[in-house]
Amino acid sequence: MNEFELIEHCFAPLAGPEGLRLKDDAALYTPRENYDLVITTDTFVEGVHFPNGMYGADVAERLLRTNLSDIAAKGGTPLGYLLSVAMHADKMEKWLPAFAKGLETTQAEFGCTLWGGDTTATTTQAVYSITLIGEVPRDEMVQRQGAAIGHDIWVTGVLGDAMLGCRLATNQLISPVPNGQDLFSFESAYWRPEPAFEYRKILQRFATAAADVSDGILADVTHISKLADGCATINFDALPFSLGAEAWADGQDDAITSRMELASFGDDYGVVFTSEQMDRQAIFDMAREARLKATLVGSVLPGSGAVSLDVEGQAMAWAQTGYRHV
């Protein structure tokens, strides 16, 4: 199939009316009254953001879900996305139908559609990019800027499962060997991260600043603290890990260093956010009533950057605080 036949076969069924059923070379969308648009983009490179030689549904789900995480961290609702695909020509016909199936599954779950994009043949690694468009009520987007000295720091979900899932995806051994349920949780955390849309009401009502946890908890909370002219101070023992990740860390030679590794890997795609101390109990109550996991992990104090403290209040040295893009 040529480019237009591949688009018609694989991607046209995913398009909503805004994408003009991919019959045009642009999309058309009129924002709703009293709503702002939220726009984000991410790029996946073969061998960097997903394993070499994998091009199917798992990669597509991971790509779209990580973009959706950015919209979730803003307290927004997804609408549609633009897709760019660059891969070797002789792999397109074999892999794009499965890739499109992964997109279809994910967009059906989160209520967005394909609005357009581009397909290009390359002789090097595959590169996929999504630009995602969402909406929030006018002037209600939760930004990275807005935290202040004294604000609480929270994180949603758990940290580290995606690191262990990445090891499984790249055929690295995990010891001690996890049980079946933990293996499933680790693989799901890596390939199908859960955007934090269920926390939308909490973020819209209480968050003073927020970012999704893509590069590691300390790295991502530093983006917030820099804009607050403060120091994000994290209580290390408060960081939330799954029982499976805890079991893995406890089975290593140095359990503390292993927990640092879990927390700094990134790819968790929960949300780290700040709030005023007076809202602490209300956040606990709202999360409990919705059966959501929101953990109070620290506060913004005078200083700069981010630091984690042990149980004695001493700063801990991390070998790596987060993923470096360049």
Image (tube, rainbow, N blue to C red):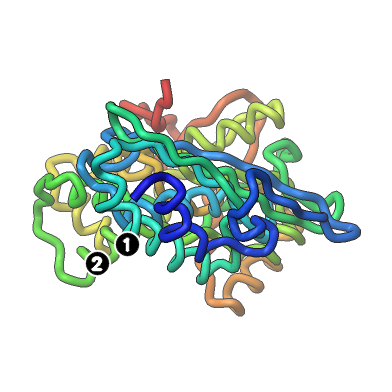
Are the residues at dot 2 and dot 1 in contact (C-beta closer than 8 Å)? yes
Q: Residue furthest top?
A: 326
Residue type marked 1: Ser
User: Which element type, helix, strand or loop, lies under badge 2?
Assistant: helix
Distance CA(mark 2)–CA(mark 1):
6 Å
Nearest the viewer among 56 and 194 is 56
Q: Going 24% across and 41% down the picture, which residue do you hit? A: 90
Q: Is residue 153 above or below residue 108?
A: above
Nearest the viewer among 201 and 35 is 35
Q: Is residue 269 visible?
A: yes
Q: Is residue 163 left or right of residue 38?
A: left
**Residue 227 image point, x, y percent:** 70, 29
**Residue 55 image point, x, y percent:** 28, 48
Q: Quadrant of residue 222?
A: top right
Nearest the viewer among 107 and 177 is 107
**Residue 94 image point, x, y percent:** 25, 53
Label 2, residues with CA under 10 Å away: few <14, some 14-19, many ≥20: few
Marking on residue 184? 2
Marking on residue 299? none
Q: Which residue is denoted by mark 1 in the rendering? A: 188
User: Which element type, helix, strand or loop, lies under badge 1?
Assistant: helix
Q: Going 24% across and 50% down the picture, which residue do you hit? A: 164
Residue type marked 2: Phe
Q: Residue furthest right?
A: 33
Label 1, residues with CA under 10 Å away: few <14, some 14-19, many ≥20: some
Q: Is residue 66 above or below residue 184?
A: above
